[in-house]
Amino acid sequence: MALREINFDGIIGPSHNYAGLSFGNLASTKNAGQVSQPRAAALQGIDKMRANLALGLAQGIFLPNARPNRSWLAELGTDYEHADAPLAAAAMSASSMWAANAATVSPAPDTSDGRCHLTAANLRTMPHRSHEWPGTLAQLKIAFADPAHFRVHGPVPPAFGDEGAANHMRVTSKHGERGLELFVYGVTGGAFPARQHLQASKAIARLHGLDPDRTLFVEQSEEAIAAGAFHNDVVAVANENVLFAHELAFADRAGLVGFCESRLPGFELVEVPAAEVPIGDAITSYLFNAQLVTPPDGEMTLVVPTEARETPTVWSWIERHIAGNGPIRRVEVVDVRQSMANGGGPACLRLRVVADPATVDPRFIVDDAKLDKLAEVIRRTWPIDIDNADLQKPSLATDVEAARTALLEALDLTELA
Ligand SMILES: NCCC[C@H](NC(=O)CCC(=O)O)C(=O)O
């Protein structure tokens, strides 16, 4: 069986809006109250997937969850029209687009039973994200239903915060080989919450049957969280034998490097010093929230958002690295501005699963023709813009619901209705 990395992108949902819900996520706070453009946002996401396909990568999708989440509001004793504004915004959030927070994935070569394990993230720190997991879990159970190859777990109990793959990295000689799994957790983030708890990461490592000698729990530096790195994938990304990270990402950088060097021949740390790229620039540009990928031609490629090209310290660092002998050989620039304005870059929008694409439900795998079909549905049904002041208009809620229904029908996934 041919194991390869598949990037599953969250389709940006028809309710995409700027409600400023994520304290500690500087872009979310800064853009609170802006008018969003769901249709343009979703088409940006489709174009990013097209760029991945053009590189020769395998591409999958996850669907937006049902919004507004009327059953969640009912559990809270209210409904969409009567809920107070923050609750209505939480029920309407399109935050499931950030698929890096959908689940943590341990591919088959790393697990004791030889299956790929996925644990849905509880996302309990932020109210608007805490009700994502049932919709996510329903999709994971369909997409990865084959019990010979996959095991899907429900979220760890909400006593401990888990934000999924955004706080998990894997280094390996090749995707299909055994790897080292690195779980990054936060203890304190100054004024901001540390969203990933050590106990949640440890539970996932146990549930996935990982080898303790090949698993490391790495503390995120307080400085990084305080500077706006609400998830580790804002300051670090790994691909195969390369860990690309900012100098200030981890509390114990030396321990992490020593662990990887002693267990993975050829391990390489590509570290960006604060003197060359201040952590603030790394966070506004999302240099590390890039997709670091190995296309079939073997040229390791960094897929960065346009904001990286617009940040002089960051762009000159990239140009120097590519001109030198570093492991990253190519850079691709994608426009995901609508998502970026909520603090979600190219890496936030995708969940990586190492598996044989033939073992995944084909409705979750895309090619260019399927993306054309999705783009047609988006152009026809997604709202053009959403003004926060109108968030509770009943017609907006029904438009958003109709748009999702059209998508489910186009993908033959009406069982998710
Ligand atoms: N991995 C990227 C996640 C971004 C996400 N933003 C948000 O939820 C912003 C939503 C808003 O403010 O409307 C978050 O912070 O978890």
Image: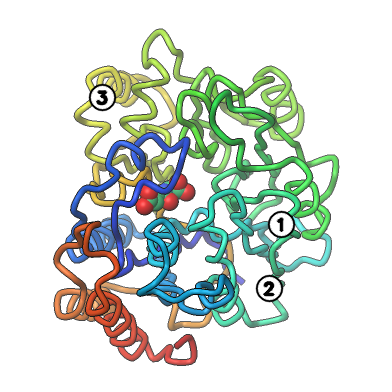
Which residue is the site of mark 3?
A: 315
**Residue extending furthest top?**
275
Mark 2, ligand 1, within 8 Å: the answer is no
Which residue is the site of mark 2?
A: 150
Q: Callout 1: 10 Å neighbours few (<14), some, many (20+)? A: some
From where the camera sits, is residue 297 visible?
A: no
Residue at 42% across, 34% down: 288
Tag 2 and tag 1, C-beta contact below 8 Å: no
Q: Where is 171 relative to 104, above or below?
A: above
Q: Where is 133 relative to 177, above or below?
A: below
Separation of residues labelled 2 and 3 (CA atoms): 40 Å
Residue at 34% across, 46% down: 342
Residue at 44% across, 66% down: 91
Q: Secondary structure at mark 2?
A: strand
Tag 2 and tag 3, C-beta contact below 8 Å: no
For this rendering, which residue is in front, 79 or 132?
79
Residue at 46% across, 39% down: 23
119 horizontally vs 332: left or right: right
Q: Secondary structure at mark 3?
A: helix
Q: Position of residue 220 (x, y in %)?
A: 62, 29
Residue type pointed to by label 1? Pro
Disc with the residue nearer the chain's start (1 vs 3): 1
Which residue is the site of mark 1?
A: 158
Residue type pointed to by label 3? Trp
Q: Secondary structure at mark 1?
A: loop
